[in-house]
């Protein structure tokens, strides 16, 4: 399954409450993604919460974009990536 890096920009910052409501929001994204064969692996969030870099597995860039749209999330840049592990060379 191809892996993608998705960069998102949030003008007002990304604010996910650390409570049941936030958990529900994330679960809804996971469920919506699954319907399109997309898996959210993990995300990195800038300190000011204005930028996220999210790692996804999915069948195509189009599926990643459709999953973002269905969840109401921006997908400013989508790049297919491969793992580069520094320990590979040891």
Image: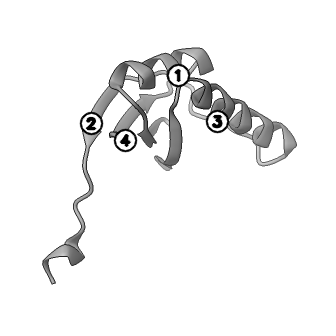
Q: Which mark is residue 67?
A: 1
Q: List the residue tagged with mark 3.
A: 30
Q: Reply above or below: 39 against 73.
A: below
Please tell me which residue lies in front, 69 or 60.
Answer: 60
Q: CA distance from mark 4 to mark 1?
A: 16 Å
Disc on the earlier residue, 1 or 3: 3
Q: List the residue tagged with mark 4.
A: 1
Percent x, y of residue 2: 33, 39
In which quadrant of the rendered view does residue 88 lie? bottom left
Please tell me which residue lies in front, 1 or 3.
Answer: 1
Percent x, y of residue 90: 16, 84
Percent x, y of residue 38: 50, 33
Q: Is residue 55 left or right of residue 30?
A: left
Q: Mark 3 or 4, which is nearer the eye?
A: 4
Residue contact at pointers 4 and 1, CB within 8 angstroms:
no
Q: Which mark is residue 78?
A: none
Indicate the secondary structure of the residue bearing disc 4: loop
Indicate the secondary structure of the residue bearing disc 2: strand
Q: CA distance from mark 1 to mark 3?
A: 9 Å
Disc on the earlier residue, 1 or 2: 1
Indicate the quadrant containing the N terminus: top left, top right, bottom left or bottom right. top left
Please tell me which residue lies in front, 73 or 46.
Answer: 73
Q: List the residue tagged with mark 2.
A: 80
Q: Residues within 10 Å of mark 3 (few under 14, many from 20)?
A: some
What residue lies at 42% left-to-right and 34% top-to-bottom?
58
Q: Residues within 10 Å of mark 4 (few under 14, many from 20)?
A: few
In which quadrant of the rendered view does residue 25 lie? top right
Q: CA distance from mark 1 to mark 2?
A: 15 Å
Q: CA distance from mark 3 to mark 4?
A: 17 Å
Tell me if residue 2 can be seen: yes
Percent x, y of residue 80: 27, 36
């Amino acid at each position: 399954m191809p892996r993608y890096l998705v960069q998102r920009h949030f003008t007002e910052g990304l604010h996910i409450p650390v409570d049941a409501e936030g958990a529900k929001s994330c679960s809804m994204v996971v469920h919506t993604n699954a319907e399109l064969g997309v898996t959210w692996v993990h995300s990195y969030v800038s300190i000011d919460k204005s930028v996220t870099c999210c790692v996804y597995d999915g069948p195509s860039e189009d599926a990643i974009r459709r999953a973002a749209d269905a969840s109401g999330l921006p997908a400013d840049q989508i790049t297919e990536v491969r793992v580069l592990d520094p320990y590979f060379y040891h």
